Image (cartoon, grey):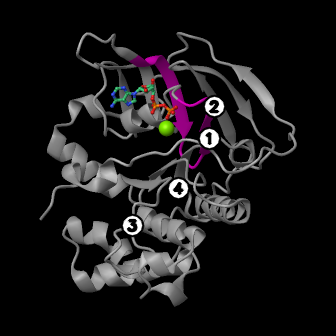
């Protein structure tokens, strides 16, 4: 069985640039980030994601100077929150996501998921943890072209050893949740970009993960499909209580989230609380037809 650590889902080739035009501003509250206001991971279980003093430096070799991609990032996300990360190309958004998800090794600081330090997990534990607790959506969809929609969605379950009949059932449920039940047998090439990304979202949520990371999920979509995708992500966040982190260039995407975190040059500069109502926290984490919360 292929290891998730070597699976192509882990490494997406990100194309920069947004196809969407920013629209009008909504009322938001801007909050400065105070360096040193460190979270307390052992005591505050409201935080599902915590980064403390996160440092990541890429060694380029061949005499070139190292690239300081993250320069001491403090960052926290509440359970059930939907947070956007915005900032210019190269400011470290993808690096932050990859470090928070334990995909990239960090060079300083620490990351806590549900209060557990990722740096204390060995690679195999981390891989299992990621498969169970995290879903990923990429700008370029990353669907396997030879598999049908339902086969793409069940694939991560099969990789982690789920019985095929169960995996198929859960994949069909996930496709229903993204409104693609009538496209189960279609290969990606026979789906529109928006539909392909919805298949990718179904694949990200099929294991009922606690956290979904989305890196420029609307970056390859037209504005109508982008709007539909964000409405879908918001709906999943509200009804399933899953935490979403969305990297985006598009302000209207950010405004769909509870909070926008602004990055520049490897640091978080400030955050905005948007006017979007908070998710319904009293709703069950995973209503009826899904099994397990994935926490
Ligand atoms: N594998 C890598 N090797 C060297 N430098 C990298 C690598 N990945 C990213 N970088 C550099 O780190 C910085 C942050 O990149 P990234 O996190 O991809 O930014 P963003 O997602 O905000 O566009 C950039 O200067 C980028 O060139
Ligand atoms: Mg990026």
Side of 259 relative to 3 (left or right): right
Q: Nearer the viewer, mark 3 or mark 1?
A: 3
- Residue 289 shows in this picture: no
Side of 192 relative to 184 (left or right): right
Q: CA distance from mark 4 to mark 2?
A: 19 Å
Quarter of the rendered structure image containing ligand 1? top left
- Residue 144 shows in this picture: yes
Q: CA distance from mark 4 to mark 3?
A: 22 Å
Give the extent of the magenta segment.
Answer: 68-89
Quadrant where the C terminus sits is bottom left
What residue do we see at 54% from left, 41% from top? 16
Q: CA distance from mark 1 to mark 2?
A: 6 Å
What residue do we see at 63% from left, 31% from top? 261
Quarter location, residue 187: bottom left
| Residue 242 disc label | 4
Q: Secondary structure at mark 2?
A: strand
User: Which is more N-terminal, label 1 or label 3?
Assistant: 1
| Residue 295 disc label | none
Q: Secondary structure at mark 1?
A: strand
Q: Are marks 1 and 2 in contact (CB under 8 Å)?
A: yes
Tell me where residue 216 appears, x and y as whole percent: 55, 47
Q: Secondary structure at mark 3?
A: loop
Magenta region, mostly helix, strand or loop? strand
Q: Are marks 3 and 2 in contact (CB under 8 Å)?
A: no
Tell me where residue 181 appears, x and y as whole percent: 52, 86
Query: In the rendered image, which residue does mark 3 sit on?
Result: 143
Give neighbour class at mark 2: few <14, some 14-19, many 20+ (Cα, 10 Å): many
Query: In the rendered image, which residue does mark 2 sit on?
Result: 261
């Amino acid at each position: 069985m292929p290891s998730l650590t070597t699976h192509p889902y882990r490494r997406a080739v990100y194309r920069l640039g947004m196809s969407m035009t920013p629209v009008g501003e909504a009322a938001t509250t801007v909050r400065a980030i105070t360096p040193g206001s460190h979270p307390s991971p052992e005591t505050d279980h409201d935080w599902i994601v915590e980064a403390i003093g996160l440092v990541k430096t890429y060694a380029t070799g061949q005499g070139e100077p190292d690239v300081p991609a993250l320069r001491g990032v403090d960052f926290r996300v509440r359970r059930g929150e939907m947070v956007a990360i915005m900032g210019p190309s190269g400011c470290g958004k993808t690096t932050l996501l990859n470090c928070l998800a334990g995909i990239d090794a960090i060079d300083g600081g620490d990351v806590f998921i549900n209060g557990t330090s990722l740096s204390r997990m060995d690679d195999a534990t981390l891989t299992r943890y990621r498969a169970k607790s995290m879903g990923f959506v990429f700008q370029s969809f990353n669907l396997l072209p030879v598999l049908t929609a339902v086969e793409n969605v069940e694939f991560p379950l099969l990789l982690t050893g789920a019985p095929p009949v169960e995996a198929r059932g859960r994949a069909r449920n996930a496709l229903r949740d993204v409104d693609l039940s009538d496209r189960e047998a279609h290969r990606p090439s026979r789906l529109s970009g928006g539909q392909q990304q919805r298949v990718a979202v179904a694949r990200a949520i099929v294991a009922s993960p606690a956290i979904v990371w989305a890196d420029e999920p609307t970056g390859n979509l037209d504005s109508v499909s982008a709007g539909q995708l964000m409405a879908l992500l918001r709906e999943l966040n509200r009804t399933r209580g899953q935490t979403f982190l969305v990297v985006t260039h598009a302000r209207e995407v950010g405004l769909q989230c509870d909070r926008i975190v602004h990055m520049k040059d490897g640091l978080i500069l400030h955050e905005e609380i948007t006017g979007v109502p908070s998710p319904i926290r009293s709703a069950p984490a995973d209503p009826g037809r899904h099994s397990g919360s994935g926490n």
